[in-house]
Every structure is written in C-alpha cells, then in structure tokens.
Image (cartoon, rainbow, N blue to C red):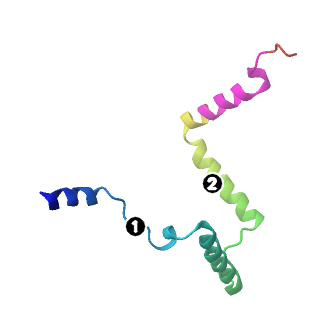
C-alpha cells in the first residue's frame, strides 16, 4: 500500500525544468542575444525591408478581416471607447 500511495503522489508532480526553462530570464536573454549576433555576423539573419513588412502586414490584415464576428467585436469595442459612445455630461 505504501508504494501505491507514493506512485500516485509522484504522478501528480510536475517534471523538473530542463534546458532553457531551468535558466534565469537574464541567462536566457544572454544566450538568445549571442545567437542573434552570430546570425547577423554570418549574414543568415532575416531583416525585413519596409516593402516586405508592408506585404506581411497586408497578409495579416486580410487574414483577420475574414473573421466577420471578430471584426464586428473590434468595431463595437472601438465605438464604445470613442467620444461619441460616452455621455455628454462633461461637455
């Protein structure tokens, strides 16, 4: 019985963090920064041109605007936050 309760208790424990997850945020940032510098030094890092960023923005906007319910919710929230949606008591 004793071993049974131990196995049940160990089944609910979260696994130990390994790799990046076990490191402090500062150490993760240091390592990531070194990788970014190395990629730029080798000429393998991706750098957006303004035209490439513009195209990517259009693609993202087109994908979001296909969801009509989402767009309606955005518009409704914007209307609630606009000056026309507030009472005119202070005016």
Badge 2 element: helix
Asked whether residue 79 is drawn in magenta, I would say yes
Badge 1 element: loop
Q: Which mark is residue 78?
A: none
Quarter of the picture containing the C terminus is: top right
Q: Quadrant of residue 39?
A: bottom right
- In the image: residue 8, left or right of residue 85: left
- In the image: residue 52, left or right of residue 19: right
Q: Which residues are magenta?
A: 73-87
For residue 41, above or below residue 85? below
The residue located at (66%, 30%) in the rendering is 77
Image marks 2 and 1: residues in contact by CB distance under 8 Å: no
Which residue is tagged 1?
Answer: 16
Image coordinates for residue 88, horizontal then vertical, percent: 81, 15
Q: Quadrant of residue 28?
A: bottom right
The residue located at (51%, 71%) in the rendering is 20
Marks 2 and 1, the one that precedes in the sequence: 1
The residue located at (56%, 42%) in the rendering is 66
């Amino acid at each position: 019985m004793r071993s049974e309760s131990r196995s049940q208790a160990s089944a609910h424990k979260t696994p130990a963090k390994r790799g990046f997850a076990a490191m402090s945020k500062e150490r993760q940032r240091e390592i990531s920064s070194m990788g970014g510098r190395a990629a730029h030094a080798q000429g393998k890092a991706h750098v957006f041109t303004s035209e490439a960023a513009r195209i990517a923005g259009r693609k993202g906007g087109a994908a979001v605007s296909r969801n009509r319910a989402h767009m309606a919710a955005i518009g409704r929230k914007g209307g609630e936050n606009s000056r026309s949606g507030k009472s005119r008591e202070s005016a």
